[in-house]
Amino acid sequence: MGKIVLITGATAGFGRATALRFAAEGHKVIITGRRKERLDELQKIIKEEHQQEVLTLNFDVRDQKAVESHLQSLPKEWQAIDILVNNAGLASGLDPIQDGLRDDWERMIDTNVKGLLYVTEAILPYMKERKSGHIINIGSTAGKEVYPRGNVYCASKHAVDALTKGMRIDLLPLGIKVTQIAPGAADTEFSTVRFHGDKEKADSVYQGYQPMTADDIAELVYYSATLPAHLCINDLVVTAVAQANSYVFHKEG
Ligand code: NDP
Ligand code: 8X3
């Protein structure tokens, strides 16, 4: 039977690919993000190509009041959320801590940690009521090992790692599954955002090896979410073959 899947950060990268993956399999998706025109465009594609219902919600996950007002008053037919994919997130800057910008630090912590908490807080009542649900947090290899200049981004993803473990323990009696997917480098808009729009610098991150794609990660989210009901992937770390951990790569050229 079709499920209801809420995906944060569905205007690009992993989130967009995940929304398309679920819709293609007959599930209803709620897509969120700040760029409204991209949400509208994705809604149109999903409706036309997959004849699936789509709810678009345009808000910034850092804005707790906006998160609350959009998610606490969902239309009745959208309230039975089966899967929440906490994907919205970003890196901002790649500087040694002594040169770091406070604005970058706040953006990463507010989005990757506090935003994830605000969204989860708003969705949990729906899952608690039904004693069922699956929360999938998008962490990172940056949440497993710290790399040079990764400081605050790595800290924010270590927080996602810890929150995933804590949520799994606390939500166990409620029958709510909690999974973390922790990818290594994947070619999305991630690095363009990290380098504040510098495309050339961003492209260089993915040169000399075959990086993962958004579709690769969407496939793993879909796989984790569609296992038999008695199974829960707790933590799934995935990299391209050319990446051994968060900082060791084998690049050609
Ligand atoms: P993209 O930049 O391609 O997509 C990021 C998405 O997050 C966009 O849809 C963006 O939407 C949304 N987003 C960012 N900030 C906010 C905000 N304040 N409020 C609401 N939505 C927001 O990056 P990826 O798809 O690569 O990244 C997705 C997740 O995966 C992130 O959590 C990232 O940290 C993580 N990750 C990425 C890896 C990679 O190498 N690409 C590897 C490991 C983890 P909009 O701008 O419209 O709001
Ligand atoms: C994103 C991948 O390598 O920039 O989490 O940390 S990396």
Image (tube, grey):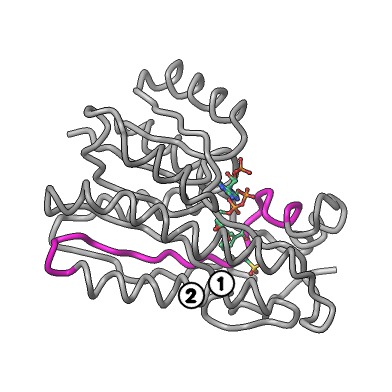
Is label 2 in a helix, a strand or a loop? Answer: helix
- How far is disc 2 from disc 1 in space, using C-alphas? 5 Å
Q: Residue at x 17, y 69 (%)?
A: 172
Could you classify mark 1 by the number of other residues whose Cα lies within 10 Å: few (under 14), some (14-19), or many (20 or more)?
many
Locate residue 195, reporting x and y percent: 80, 58
Stretch of the chain drawn in magenta: 172-193
Disc 1 residue type (three-letter): Ser
Task: Give 114 or 198, whichever is nearer the viewer.
Answer: 114
Locate residue 85, reporting x and y percent: 39, 51
Q: Residue at x 30, y 70 (%)?
A: 167
Q: Given the current orientation, which residue lies at the most extreme top position?
A: 48
Residue at the spot of label 2: 159
Q: Residue at x 44, y 38 (%)?
A: 19
Locate residue 32, reporting x and y percent: 48, 38
Residue 50 tag number: none
Pick the quarter of the image with the N terminus. top left
Contact between marks 2 and 1 (CB within 8 A): the answer is: yes
Left or right placement of residue 56 versus residue 95 in this view: left
Position above or below: 92 against 63? below
Pick the quarter of the image with the C terminus. bottom right
Task: Give 221 or 101, whichever is nearer the viewer.
Answer: 101
The total number of labels drawn is: 2
Residue at the spot of label 1: 156
Is label 1 in a helix, a strand or a loop? Answer: helix
Residue 169: quarter of image: bottom left
Locate residue 129, reporting x and y percent: 13, 49
